[in-house]
Image (cartoon, rainbow, N blue to C red):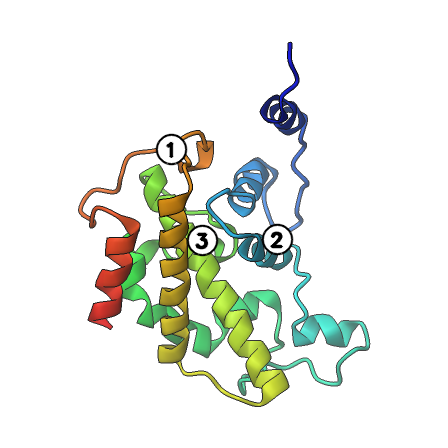
Amino acid sequence: MQWTPKIVQRQIHARDVSEPNGALPSATADHVWGNVASKRLTNQHKDSAWMAIQEGLPVRAFMHARGLNRYKSCPRGCTADETTNHLFWKCAYTQDLLKALSTELGAWIPTPCITADLVMYGLIPGSHAFRDLQGCWRLLCCFKYVLLFSRNRLVVGKKDTSTLGCRKMIHSLLCDYAALDGSVDDSNDETCRGPLPTGTLEGPLTCCLFFLFRA
């Protein structure tokens, strides 16, 4: 057998063992780490998703526990500690941004399915089309990346970012993904297989432009 790069990669993946996480049931570990390593994400979004699950992002509670920050409360004025879960779910600013993205998220999944487990880990109850789940997870990774960026901009630069500004940045990232989808052949990518979502526009670029003109 000739050892091509694809065969070597397949052999390595076959021997992979999913690392357990204290916040996750062991039965879901494979699915969660599969979401993080999806080939449909950029390296930056993979890194931020991985650090969010490992609770290794430099939020105030993380830094305060290590003696690197005087404060541990949310910089947006919340009285709660700024943990990863607070940054990406519990914060009032985060909930406002999720409401602003209700149209975009609704194109992939029903609004009642948007939970903390979905935002943090890509876990969703019920049966949904695989392409819908992948599109929703990509959108949520953009959402978390922009949230972290706006948070750092507030803490370091003392500049606040409106939910409208964050929404526009998310749209920009989605357009970058649409351009990437058009230039990369992912027919052999197992994470990209599945039927097109019913009831949505035909292509990711068309869908992205649709949301931009509606904003």
Name the mark nearer the viewer: 1 or 2: 1
Query: For the residues marked 3 and 1, what is the alpha-carbon distance in whole angstroms?
Result: 20 Å
Question: Disc 1 marks which amino acid?
Answer: Arg
Question: Disc 3 marks which amino acid?
Answer: Leu
Q: Would residue 150 be found to the left or right of residue 103 on screen?
A: right
Mark 1 or mark 3, which is nearer the start of the sequence? 3
Query: For the residues marked 3 and 2, what is the alpha-carbon distance in whole angstroms?
Result: 14 Å
| Residue designated by label 2 | 50
Few, some or many C-alpha atoms within 10 Å of disc 2 (few <14, some 14-19, many ≥20)?
many
Q: Would residue 65 be found to the left or right of residue 120 on screen?
A: right
The answer to whether marks 1 and 2 mark residues whose Cβ atoms lie closer than 8 Å is: no
- SS at circle 2: helix
Q: Nearer the viewer, residue 90 or 94?
A: 94
Q: Would residue 167 be found to the left or right of residue 68 on screen?
A: left
Few, some or many C-alpha atoms within 10 Å of disc 1 (few <14, some 14-19, many ≥20)?
few
| Residue designated by label 1 | 193
Taking 8 as reference, is 79 above or below it? below
- SS at circle 1: loop
Q: Position of residue 159 (x, y in %)?
A: 53, 88
Q: Quadrant of residue 14?
A: top right
The quadrant the N terminus occupies is top right
Marking on residue 137 = none
Q: What residue sits 50% from the left and 71% below the top? A: 147
Q: What residue sits 52% from the left and 56% below the top? A: 120
Mark 2 or mark 1, which is nearer the start of the sequence? 2
The answer to whether marks 3 and 2 mark residues whose Cβ atoms lie closer than 8 Å is: no
Q: Quadrant of residue 154?
A: bottom right
| Residue designated by label 3 | 118
Q: Position of residue 17 (x, y in %)?
A: 67, 32
